Image (cartoon, rainbow, N blue to C red):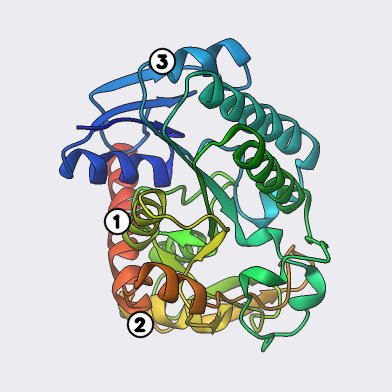
Amino acid sequence: MARVLVTGAGGFIGAHLVRLLRERGEWVRGVDIKRPEFAPTAAHEFLIRDLRDRSACAEVVEGIDHVYHFAANMGGIGYITAVAAPLMHDNVLMDAHMLEAARCAEVERFFYASSACIYPTFRQDAADSPALREDEAYPADPDNEYGWEKLYVERMCAAYANEHGMTIRVGRMHNVYGPEGAYDGGREKAPAALARKVAQAGDGDELEIWGDGQQTRSFCYVDDAIEGAYRLLHSDVTVPVNVGSSRLVTIDELADILAAIAGKQLTKRHLLDKPQGVRGRNSDNTLVRSLLGWEPNTSLEDGLAATYRWVAAQIEASVATTR
């Protein structure tokens, strides 16, 4: 039985990953600056630590075989464009300290959660931009500082693997969504934000959309994302690989699917002064299919239905407590 560390285990993806690893018979230590907000942790051991502190990173890897490094200061486009300096500061400290701690502890395998934000802006300047291949990361031109930091740490991972013989796997996560993720407060991403707005709207109400609604994305359901991370860690793949859906939709289409799930007729009001990121971003899954014989397969409709039900239940419970 492997002894596994999940950083960011108090967050959205990390909390789901801890449950998956428990189900597969692994001993799991979770670590985060906070406990999971929406459900008790499934970790055998959960430590509250600040991974910006080098000594904390050294402590949490003690006795560990495998590391899944998901801890990050991050959020949706409104958040990451508003707090670029602290975001880069926090993340580069956590990432650098975790890599060095894992090296010193002779951890067997290390998974780094990178992001689709590393891809160049000039490859994402149209709503129908071609899906992004892993070999298109350079010449580098991420559209935000979060992406630059992620790309820099991808280079750190490669350096640690080359110079220290570490077994490191890198997954470029594409717009992961699902139940138990932030849905308000500023850090939420488009699926959860729209699910909240739809749940709070009455039939016939107006729905606010950031941008003109024609910007495009692909969205990866959390169960698929953690399965991809698990398979990648246990593989012999040495290059960064996309972990994302290859189905491209506009933000207007995303809103329409959620409204249909809720059984509501809503009109859209587009807020053109709000941040909307790159114009179009999709995952090319050719490489992950060839290397792992797998790709995400949860339909957008099924994933959004589960997400909407969960968000709506949270809002209903919140309203009930204020009555």
What is the x, y in percent for residue 232?
41, 55
Q: Secondary structure at mark 3?
A: loop
Which residue is found at the position 76% from the left and 77% from the top?
123
Tell which of 249 and 135 is nearer to you: 135
Disc assigned to residue 244: none
Residue at the image point whose x is 35% and y is 56% from the top: 231
Residue 184 at x, y = what percent? Answer: 51, 48
Q: Residue furthest bottom?
A: 128
The image shows residue 142, relative to residue 265, as above or below, that is above
Name the residue beneath numbered marker 1.
310
What x and y, as percent, mark residue 190? 54, 64
Q: Which residue is mark 2?
A: 260
Q: Could you tell me how far apart the alpha carbons at marks 3 and 1 are, in whole angstroms?
A: 36 Å
Alpha-carbon span between mark 3 and mark 2: 49 Å
Label 2, label 1: how far apart the Cα atoms are? 16 Å
Q: Quadrant of the C terminus?
A: top left
Closer mark to the observer between disc 3 and disc 1:
3
Q: Is residue 266 visible?
A: no
Q: Is residue 176 left or right of residue 305?
A: right
Amino acid, disc 1 = Trp
Please determine whether, in this image, residue 169 is positioned above or below residue 175: above
In this rendering, the label closer to the viewer, 3 or 2: 3
Residue 62's mark?
3
* Disc 2 residue type (three-letter): Ala
Upstream in sequence: badge 2 or badge 1: 2
Residue visible at 83% across and 62% down in the picture:
141
